[in-house]
Image (cartoon, coloured by chain):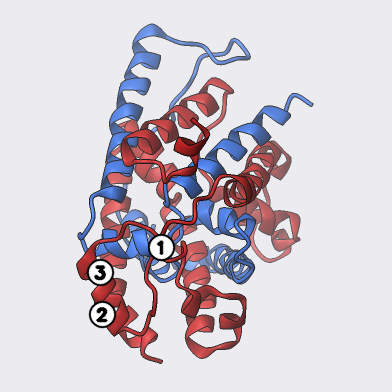
Amino acid sequence: MRKIKFLFAGLLLGIIFTKSEVVSWYRIYEMFKFKSFHMFGIIGSAIITGIIIIQVIKKRRIKSINGTSILFTPKQITWKRYLFGGTIFGLGWAMTGACPGPIFTLVGNGYLSFLVVVFSALIGTFLYGYFIKKLPH
Amino acid sequence: MIELIKEPWPWYIAGPLIALMMFLLLFFGKNFGLSSNLRTMCSIGGAGRFSEFFRFDWKSQIWNLILLSGVVLGGFIASEYMSSAAPMDLNSDIIIELQSLGIKNPGEQLLPEELFATDAIFSLRGMILLVGGGVLIGFGTRWAGGCTSGHAISGLSNLQLPSLIAVIGFFIGGITMTYFFLPIILSL
């Protein structure tokens, strides 16, 4: 039952994604055409708020709910996987107009066609795992 | 107040709220990243028989699956009880451009009917967008080790250079698709 808090957190995220139109194919199309500030405003203000939050957590040594310290694991220092993987994801993001959270939110919104996207994303993830040793990282 | 919630939320409300959700998850001792759920689902489905990548303690990720079910439910609640009938406030150039690409009423709903209505699944361009887009999302996010939530929000908030490289990649891919390939796919 202690995990129910994650259901509520997800619920809020799903509502935010829908009400801010992050789930909208049109908003992603506008973003990649640089014709609207909306998506840049959302991602930009999230990052600025996030930077402040993480600085405060580090400076004040804020502890998590379990009393343990909040740790940040630095990402591997390399570039190939980020650039190549990122580009592949970007292609898919522009096609469906949705990233991995919103593909699920859209199912909740009643767009059953996105069940096909979810299933295909599982296949894509599986293919990555299958070919992992052949890919540059 | 209720009416205000039903309106589309402006960027300066949504952005900080997403960052607060990231904080909430850190406070719960977890990390904000939604695409890793796809790996967890593959593991549960038995993908570990084919690749070591899927042999991990997926039970440690149950919290994230619960979060994800909330993400679905949140979409349902927002569309069922919090939506307004007003069309989206899209850029006027974009509206004209999309109409010339065959989308009749841009912004009338959240997604273009022509591409994402249920019967679009059985059209050629619908299949390309849904299946092709989905596969690229799944493959790309795992290769890059994260998506918009993991890299753009969590990673950049922690000033991680690898996340910046990933986000540059997101835009290289997104711009290439939007400028060069989408017009072709939409004309099919």
The hue of chain A in the figure is blue
* Up-down relation of residue B4 to residue A40 (above or below): above
Mark 3 highlights which residue?
B94
Say whether mark 2 and mark 3 are on the same chain.
yes
Q: Alpha-carbon neighbours of circle 1 within 10 Å: few (<14), some, or many (≥20)?
A: many
Say whether mark 1 and mark 2 are on the same chain.
no
- Residue B180 — which label? 2
Q: Alpha-carbon neighbours of circle 3 within 10 Å: few (<14), some, or many (≥20)?
A: some
**Given the image, what chain letter belongs to the residue carrying mark 1?**
A
Q: Are marks 2 and 1 in contact (CB under 8 Å)?
A: no
* Up-down relation of residue B32 to residue A35 (above or below): above
Q: Amino acid at mark 3?
A: Ile
Gap in angstroms between the C-alphas marked 1 and 3:
23 Å
Q: Amino acid at mark 2?
A: Phe
SS state under label 3: helix
Near-viewer residue (A44 or B111): B111
Mark 1 highlights which residue?
A89
